[in-house]
Image (spheres, coloured by chain):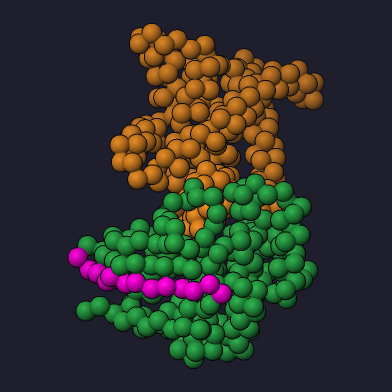
Chain colours: A green, B orange
Amino acid sequence: MLEIKNLTKRFGNKTVIDDLSMTVKDNEIMAIVGPSGAGKTMLLRCITGLESANQGTFFWNGNQFDPTNTDQKDTIIGIVFQDYQLFPNLTVMGNITLAPTMVKKLPLDQVKQTARDLLGRLGLDGKEDLYPFQLSGGQKQRVAIVRALAMNPKILCYDEPTSALDPALRDEVAEIILDLKKQKMTQIVVTHDMDFAQNVADEIKRVEQID
Amino acid sequence: MIQYIEQILPALLSGTKMTLSIFFWTLIASIPLGALVGLGLIQRFKPLVWLLNIYVWLMRGTPLLLQLIFVFYGLPILGIIFQRYDAALFAFILNYTAYFGEIFRGGFQSVPKGQFESARVLRLSYGQTIRKIVIPQVFKIVLPSIGNEVINLVKDSSLVYVIGLGDLLRAGNVATARDVTLLPLILVGIIYLALTAVCTIVLKLIEKRENIWQ
């Protein structure tokens, strides 16, 4: 269970997130919806430690943690960026195995096996040796999901997962997210797409722009 | 004429050896050093950036010829004495590192911020990120500009004559003055063309290899 307590994020004198508290239960999907500029992405950036919050505390299963500290033993949060941010100079397999082998020092064979299983589950068989520029948008997104999952995070976050996809692919992402839920993955989905949120989420948190 | 060419060729080839030696060692040292300077130029620690900017300004703002003379004739006044060859290498490496540094700075700045963030969320360290993700992308971006400098370096190496080193151009000059014929200099031109042609082909091959990803 992830708990966020009294999170506040300011830039200068502009408050982007004001005293937000929320709880994400295990194996559930939490959707965060709201209009552009409501601070959804900023919330995700605070959770993933890319921005440090002005105030607020994070707890994983009751233990406080600092998302900006990259030295911790386990990966708690994984994220799939809106524009995926795959590494263009590495193959699909290279993208997935880089962090587990370098950060967690896992043996390459073992990581590759895990990667192949995950790629197969997401319909990416045989794409191991392609470079990101050879993939479609939807495929890139699924590689980004596999790359995040390979670090074995406790929670997987998505930033606007449907924004770059056509409607058919939108349903596909929904299926992937729901499938991962069956595998007991806790997920946070940031989106402005209310229909999509209602399709996948167990709980919807609405955020509004602060005047 | 063939006989004459045979007669002066050993001197020209020995000059070529000096030219290649300056060329080779300057590249080996100044490309990695340039990458470091480029990395330094994008840091947030301002004093470092100022220092590096002054260095780059000095090196790019004065003629390489002047720098050569200064290193060989000027530094001994401060008690730093170089052999001719070492002085030449020192000046060339200092000069080319500055140019490569600026090229690499541009390369580093064109890697999207998202790549750094993506690596950070995967908990890669800064060093790992630079080595495995940023440098390979930067290398591909800067390759054409580096290629330009490499070709320039082949020809710039002829400046070492000023501190009395016997390179290719000097060997040709000596023969021309002695025998009152332009033929040695034509040969010199052909050898320079051959050297730059080899460089061009090698650079193209490297670019081609880099083109497997985009």
Q: Nearer the viewer, residue B148 or B105?
A: B105
Q: Position of residue B18 (x, y in %)?
A: 63, 21
Magenta stretch contains residue B157? no
Residue at the location (51% across, 84% down)? A201
Q: Position of residue A107 (x, y in %)?
A: 72, 48
Magenta stretch contains residue A19? yes
Q: Is residue B156 above or below residue B200?
A: above
Q: Nearer the viewer, residue A203 or B4?
A: A203
Q: Residue furthest left?
A: A13
Q: Nearer the viewer, residue A171 or B154?
A: A171
Which region shows up in magenta?
A13-27
- B95 horizontally vs A14: left or right: right
Residue at the location (67% across, 36% down)? B195
Quadrant assignment, res B202: top right
Residue at the location (44% across, 84% down)? A204
Quadrant assignment, res B41: top left
Q: Does residue A18 appear anywhere in the picture?
A: yes
